[in-house]
Amino acid sequence: MPLSDEEQRILQAIEKQFHAEDPKLANEVAKTSIYRHTGRQLKLAIIGIVVGLLLMVILLAKSILFALVGFGVAFASAVWAYYIFRRMTRAGLDDFRRKSRNFWARRSEHEHKRGPFGNGGP
């Protein structure tokens, strides 16, 4: 249900007051989303999958039992990633993708300005 005009004016007044009283906190709140923590957990789960698969491949030469430890780590991380995805709503995934794209675009633009060796020239 959308807000009425009066409610929107009240909300804007509260936002202005918040920015005036504590601009540092207001900027920090504006930068973060509710999906930041979930995104961080998802990255850790993906790293866990990769590490588990690497352990499995590397330890397979030593013993199958050791390789099962790597498989267990990868499997547990995959289950964790699955539950993280289930917690994220469609809007959360879209927000996460947009912010990731913006991060990589800014990074690419910054590297383009610096040059390939960080010295500002070609």
Image (cartoon, helix red, strand yellow):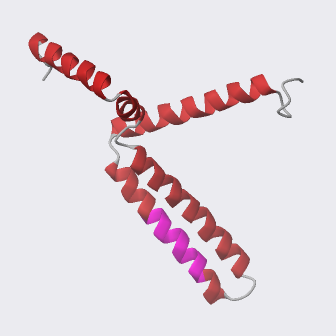
- Residue 66: image x %, image y %? 63, 86
Residue 10 colored magenta? no
* Residue at the extreme top of the image, as rendered: 5
Where does the C terminus fall, quadrant-wise? top right
Q: Quadrant of residue 22?
A: top left
* Residue at the extreme right of the image, as rendered: 122
Residue located 79% across and 27% down the image: 114
* Residue at the extreme front of the image, as rendered: 21
Please give the count of numbered marks on the rendered protein.
Answer: 0
Q: Is residue 2 above or below residue 73?
A: above
Which is more toward the observer, 108 or 51?
108
Which is more toward the observer, 35 or 32?
32
Region in magenta? 68-79
Where does the N terminus fall, quadrant-wise? top left
Residue located 15% across and 20% down the image: 2
Judged left or right of residue 3, residue 43 is right
Judged left or right of residue 33, residue 68 is right
Which is more toward the observer, 52 or 43?
43
- Residue 8: image x %, image y %? 16, 16
Residue located 60% across and 76% down the image: 70
Residue located 86% across and 34% down the image: 117
- Residue 71: image x %, image y %? 57, 75
Which is more toward the observer, 33 or 65?
33
Q: Quadrant of residue 12?
A: top left
**How would you classify the magenta stretch by its main secondary structure?**
helix
Residue 71 colored magenta? yes
